[in-house]
Every structure is written in structure tokens, then in C-alpha cells.
Amino acid sequence: MDINKILESQRQFFQSGATLSVKFRIEMLKKLYHTVKKYETEICKALLEDLGKSDFESFMCEVGLTLTEISYMIRHTRKFAREKNVYTPLSQFASRSYKKPSPYGNTLIMSPWNYPFLLTIEPLANAIAAGNTAIIKPSAYSPATSAIIKKIITECFSSKYVAVVTGGRRENATLLEKKFDFIFFTGSQNVGKEVLRHTAETLTPVVLELGGKSPCIVDSSAKLKLAAKRIVFGKYLNCGQTCVAPDYILCHKSVKDQFIKEVCMQIKKQYGQNPLCNSDYGKIINEKHFNRLCSLMDKNKTVFGGEANKDTLQIAPTVMDNVTWDDAIMQEEIFGPIMPILTFENFSELYALLANKPKPLALYLFSENKKHIKEVTRRLSYGGGCINDTIIHLATSKMGFGGVGESGMGAYHGKEGFDAFSHSKSIVDKKTWIDLPVRYQPYHRKMYSKLLKILFK
């Protein structure tokens, strides 16, 4: 595949103005929606092959959310694309001031392997709605899903409009050397830094959706049984390979033992006595990540789980107690089914503790204490999160999803996604039937000086 030819054909297609029509954008979104529906079974089979996801989980966490986002953009693109009038100051009389959303042009979408379908097609829907062309680069670690994505995109669109480039690091590097008008990247912080270095060279705007160690705080007022149920769901979904999964637990010392007991009961209830034999429990993406996760587990601190099968690349839901900030598992994002539990005694100490950590993509608080809830949401900086639940804040097109600081920049989903792939032009349409002379030289005329002070009051 000649990347240069694809990019040049997309430049010409965009410059022709073909993507600017809102009617065209909506038609393309509808085409994408129906094609995703058509290949729903094949998408689920691909996700099973790459990550061991069950049909239910594949639909709930990937296909269903993707269809919801496309449907949302179909319904709202016309409204999002409208010019928006804004107030014009008296000093600019007579004129109309407005903001006009405009597509960036040729965009690059680089997606990860953990939710390979969702995190490819969702941003594509935003890019199409905003009027761009797109080159998609899915992860090499999820080849079956990449193949079905390519099949869907090839059936839906001409490569001069949307194209898929498969491959590994060489293809990534080649794409990043090209000049795009906008780049959307989802993945690790290390690769995100490389993307930012390349985009800095060409001053290309970029959205980075990264990860990090997302804390989950459980205070002494939390409803422990419900907290454990929801934390177990969020932590072990997709075998922990979720960018917004609770990375570690900060539990009040007074309720820690009871919380661990409830967590262990929930793991058995949700995954069975032997999770590695549960057909709905997935696997680690590859041997490299499997070995990394195994090296992070400390057998002396493992109080539940810990079983691993190298042949199937599976690690059972695992709980570690008495973990300290110096342990290996606290030095990097886990991105796997291991739950380390740390404790605290004074809630107020958490603010200083977490403020000095890299800003996480998500933060979760389980509490019935309104003061704690208000203070955490007000004082701590993080991408987004939940009170008394996990993960579900990203499952809506009504709110933007994105990181802050080390966990990323920019946001998408719904209106925020449309805005991310758009530049908002600020335009003043000055009328010609009158021309106030106050701004023109000579400036020494006293009458104009007084008028100027009135106009800028």
C-alpha cells in the first residue's frame, strides 16, 4: 500500500469540497452504521480471537457503544455544523459576528489493541461528522479486528475518503513522518510522547487519549458490598486491559479487611470458582504483556487469585494486600487483572498524596460522605470518573471523554468529538451601508475621542 498516494488522493478529495456538505456527511455515517450492523457477528468473532471477549462483552463494550455514537452523530451533525451567532460589540456596528465549524482536512486516527473496534470507529464517526477525510491505523496486536475493520471500511468508502493502513511500527513511523491536518491517537504514554514529538515538527494539532494509574478510593462510609461488586466489574472487565479501569485501590484502614472479603466474594460470584475455565473470561493480548503482568505479582502479597496459564495467556482475577508505593506493581500502569490494595487513615491526606502523582485518566470514589465527594471532585485533577461506580462515565455521547496532563489532551464523544475534529472560525461580517469614521486617522479630533470612550465602555 502506497501511503503517499493515499494521502495525496485524500488531499485532492478534501480540497474538492466533497466532504463539506452536511447531507454527504450524514449519508456516510448512515452507510457506516448499516455496514457495522451487517458485520456484527464477524466483529464479535474477531474480538474473541484477539482478546477472548464473549459475544455479550463484545457487543456491550465495543459494537453497541460504536453504533450508539454513530447514531448520535447522525441525529446531531446538522445542528453541530451550523454557524453560531455571537454578540457583536457596539464599536463594530453594523456587523454580524459568528463562529463557523470547519473540518481540519486530512486526519490520521491511530487506535490501540485493547478495545480495537470501539476506539477506531468511534473517533472515525466524529471525523466524518466534522467533514474530514481519514486514514485509520489500527494496532498490529489485534490483527483479526484490524482485518474486519479494513473489510468494513473498504466496503463503505473509497480510499480517497477513508482508508485503512495495517502493519506495525514501521507503518506507524512512516505515517507520523507525513503531514496531516490533525492526528487522533489512543494508546500508551510512551507512544503518545513520540506522536507529540512528530506533530511538534509540523505544528499539527493532536488529541492524545492516554492512560495512567487511575485510583479508586473507598472511604469508611462506602457501601462495601455494592462497592466491591462495581469495582470488580470495572477492574476485571476485558481482563483489566481497559484504560479507565481502577488501577489500584486506596481503602480506609478501618474497612479494608471487610472490603477484601467482599471483593473475593464478588470475584467468585461474577467469574466462578475457577475463572480460567470461564468461557466468558478473556485473555491477555500477547505473551509479552502476559510475562510483564506475571512479573508484577508478588506471591507473598497475593491474597486471592494469582493463577496463570501461559498456554491460554490467561491470568485469574488477582487481589494483592499490604501493597506499598515502592512495590513493583505501583511503578507502572498495570493494565491487567491485578488489584493492589493500599490503605489510608486520614482522608485529608489523600489530596496532597494524589496531587503529587501524575494526573490520571480516571478517578473513582466510593463514599456516602457528601463532603468527601465535593472535595475530591473539586480539588483533584483527573480526566473524568464516577462517584460510587466505575468506567460508565465513558459510555455516553452526551459527555466528552479525555485525559489531562500525563493522561492526555483533548476529548471526544458526541459534541466534543465533533469539536475535536473541527476548527471553529471566528468571523465578522461587516456591513457596507454605514462606516463609522471613529477608528480612522487623524486621531486628534476630540469629538471622536469622547465617542470612542462611550463605545468601549
Image (tube, rainbow, N blue to C red):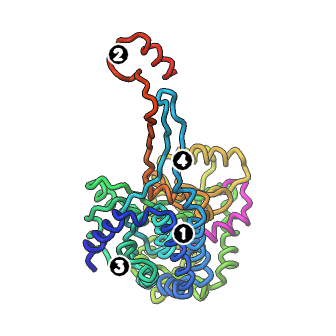
How far across and how far down the image is residue 457, in percent?
52, 21
List the residue tagged with mark 4.
Answer: 84
Residue range corresponding to the magenta coloring:
219-240
Q: Residues within 10 Å of mark 1 (few under 14, many from 20)?
A: some
Q: Mark 3–mark 4 contact, CB under 8 Å?
A: no
Q: Mark 1–mark 2 contact, CB under 8 Å?
A: no
Tag on residue 411? none
Question: Magenta stretch mostly in which secondary structure?
Answer: helix
Q: Distance between the residues labelled 1 and 2?
A: 79 Å
Return the residue found at the far top: 446
Q: Mark 2–mark 4 contact, CB under 8 Å?
A: no
Q: How far apart are marks 3 and 1 (CA)?
A: 41 Å
Return the residue found at the far front: 433
Relative side of 4 to 71, left or right? left
Three-letter amino acid code of the residue under disc 2: Tyr
Label 1 SS: helix
- Circle nearer the N terminus (2, 4): 4
How far across and how far down the image is residue 433, in percent?
46, 32
Label 4 SS: strand
List the residue tagged with mark 2.
Answer: 443
Q: How crowded is mark 3: few (under 14 residues within 10 Å), some or many (20 or more)?
A: some
Q: How crowded is mark 4: few (under 14 residues within 10 Å), some or many (20 or more)?
A: some
